[in-house]
Amino acid sequence: MVAPSTKRVVLFASGSGSNVENIVHYFQGRRDVTIAMVLTNKRDAKVLERCNKLNISALYFNKTAFLKSDGVLDILKGLNPDLIVLAGFLLKIPANLLLQFPDKIINIHPSLLPKYGGKGMYGHHVHTAVKANGEKETGITIHYVNERYDEGAIIHQAKTTLLKTDSVDLIAEKVHQLEFAHFPKIIDQLLQ
């Protein structure tokens, strides 16, 4: 039984769901926060398997339900989330969701925005660009979602130092460690 004061979080993911799993583990056993559901736009996303193992409700939706109807909006209204978290979700959030949930949708981006943000800049595309430009540091940005990719108000940034010898895979691993360390804590702070 969920207590009335329990904060409800809905997670969106498009990929493997490692951030989803990390967030679920962080809040496990907490009575004040529940992961209400995980939503994905990929029928074969590995996050669905993770949710099954974690005993978390998960749902696949297609582009029409997301962009051309109120299908996903209706699901979210029914879930009544206190926070919607994009944890490796690659689609742009449509206006109907932004209007219904102002300042309740957050995203994590694998760079120090405004650097390396925008359409097509995700995952290895970001890390490859960071490496190609010889950056001395990179990191993560947790931000509110608005109508433009990666341009919402910044909530939190964390940095890691890079060496010239760091491979793209090592850069990705350093960023992933920052995501794991900071994302659940910032979600927790926003819910308080």
Image (cartoon, rainbow, N blue to C red):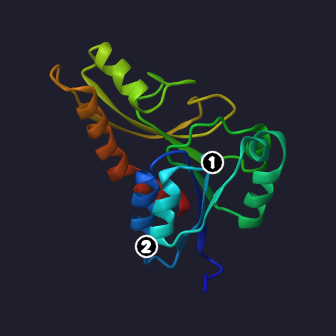
For label 2, the SS is: loop
Residue 139 % position (x, y): 34, 34
Nearer to the camera, 9 or 173 = 173
Q: Please, what is the three-letter code of the amino acid marked with disc 1? A: Ile
Nearer to the camera, 159 or 63 = 63
Quarter where residue 167 is shown: top left
Q: Which residue is mark 1?
A: 105
Q: Which residue is mark 2?
A: 28
Query: Taking 161 as reference, is 15 left or right?
Result: right
Instruction: Name the residue: 71% across, 46% down.
Output: 62
- In this view, which residue lies farthest toward the bottom? 1
Instruction: Name the residue: 46% across, 76% down.
Output: 30
Classed neighbour count for the residue bearing mark 2: other residues with Cα under 10 Å, few (<14), some (14–19), many (≥20): few
Instruction: Name the residue: 83% across, 40% down.
Output: 68
Quarter where residue 96 is shown: top right
Residue 88 % position (x, y): 50, 43
Residue 71 % position (x, y): 80, 52
Quadrant holding the N terminus: bottom right
For the residues labelled 2 and 1, say whether their Cβ atoms are less than 8 Å apart: no
Q: Please, what is the three-letter code of the amino acid marked with disc 2? A: Gln
Query: Taking 124 as reference, is 150 left or right?
Result: right
Instruction: Name the residue: 69% across, 32% down.
Output: 147
